[in-house]
Amino acid sequence: MIKKFKQLFICFLVSTFTFVGFTQSVHAAMISTEQAVAATTAQQNREKVEAALNRPDVAAELERMGVAKSEADARVAALSDAEVAALAGRVDSLPAGGDIIGTVVFIFVLLLVTDILGLTKVYPFTRSIR
């Protein structure tokens, strides 16, 4: 009788421990239209800045200034949504096929400032505040 009770108890424990890992809780909530639009706009701004960085002339100018493409991509990924929106607005305001040097200088300065603040380490000649 005890042996059968032990076997039943062990089977119960094994099945309990097996299914404990499968239980998950899910929380759903309503979001406003403004939140949905803001998320979409932030993603579009990031894509716009990344597309500008992927242009061959911009990549060549960044390489000339000593910034690798992978480092520039990492910096853009680390920017906040507000910073990306400002950068995307700057990209939009440039004339088509026009002053790309201004954009490259802006990106260089932006990367330099984030390097000085200690958020990244791209330029070896800067010392971070931290």
Image (cartoon, helix red, strand yellow):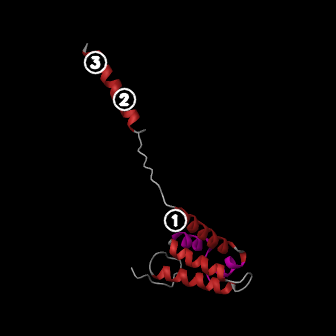
Residue 33, x across and y down, in percent: 53, 62
For label 3, the SS is helix
Q: Is residue 8 above or below residue 75?
A: above
Q: Secondary structure at mark 2?
A: helix
Reading the chain from its start, which is encountered first: label 3 or label 1?
Answer: 3
Q: Residue at x 36, y 31 (%)?
A: 16
- Answer with left or right where residue 98 lies relative to residue 22: right
Question: Is the C terminus in the top left, top right, bottom left or bottom right quadrant?
Answer: bottom left
Q: Which residues are magenta?
A: 57-78
Q: Which residue is tagged 1?
A: 34
What is the crowding at mark 2: few (fewer than 14 residues within 10 Å), some, or many (at least 20)? few
Q: Which mark is residue 14?
A: 2
Q: Which secondary structure dominates the residues rendered in magenta?
A: helix
The image position of residue 2, as x and y in percent, is 25, 16
**Which residue was labeled with disc 3?**
5
Label 3 vs label 1: CA separation?
60 Å
| Rendering quarter of residue 106 | bottom right
Q: Amino acid under label 2?
A: Val
68 left or right of 114 in image: right
